[in-house]
Amino acid sequence: MQTKTIQPIHVLCFETKTSFKELFQYVRVEARKLYQDAIRNDLEITGPVYWVYNGADGNAETIFTLTIALPITPPSHTINSHYRLKQLDVFECVTEQLYGNWDGLINTYGSLFGEIMSRKLVPSGQNREIYLNMDFDNPDRNITEVQIGILK
């Protein structure tokens, strides 16, 4: 586990209200559309896909805000997109990388929240997952960075 300060990131993003129970309808759908839209609008892609969870508490029924974000260089031209341009704010977090299948996310989150509690840190209510490598055919090759926001 590591503590980091993530600087602001300009993104093209999809945002919705959802729950973990309904989350799978966005997997392999919105990120792909974001990439296509960025290329169609001649945007420079500067990083991997982020999934940002605001207000998620781990309960399958809880409604939270999901942002699926693709880092980009802010465009100097007008774009034609139904996606939103925005900046993710500075983000203080504890972080750990998961190597392998996403079934391991529950353990990664458990480890991070355990460390947050033992260090008496206060969660901010925002979590991020950065998909450094996604291999849907060989999920043991996935590399995911989990970031849990903390208040300073």
Image (tube, rainbow, N blue to C red):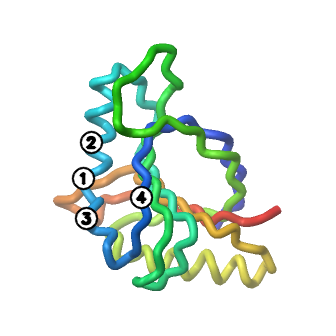
Q: Nearer the viewer, mark 4 or mark 3?
A: 4
Q: Measured from the top left, where is residue 65 in percent x and y?
A: 49, 63
* Three-letter amino acid code of the residue under disc 1: Val
Can you tell which mark lies on residue 16?
4
The type of residue carrying mark 2 is Lys
Distance of mark 4 from mark 3, alpha carbons?
12 Å
Find residue 4 and report its horizontal and vertical position in percent.
Answer: 70, 54
Dot 4: element? strand
Q: Quadrant of the N terminus?
A: bottom right
| Closer to viewer: mark 4 or mark 1 | 4
As drawn, is 62 to the left or to the right of 30?
right
Q: Which residue is mark 3?
A: 25
76 or 119: nearer the viewer: 76
Q: In the rendered image of this protein, does residue 28 appear above or below residue 83? A: below
Is the Cβ of the residue at disc 1 closer than 8 Å to that at disc 2? Answer: yes
**Label 2 belongs to which residue?**
33
- The residues tagged by marks 1 and 2 sit, at their Cα atoms, a distance apart of 6 Å
Q: CA distance from mark 4 to mark 1?
A: 13 Å
Asked which secondary structure carries label 2, the reply is helix
Q: Residue at x 43, y 43 (%)?
A: 13
Circles 1, 3 touching at the beta carbon (< 8 Å): yes
Q: Earlier in the sequence, mark 2 or mark 3?
A: 3
Residue at image coords 53%, 59%: 128
What's the amino acid at mark 4?
Thr
Q: Residue at x 35, y 19 (%)?
A: 42
Report whether 86 appears left or right of 106. Answer: right
Tell me, yes or no, if residue 145 can be seen here: no
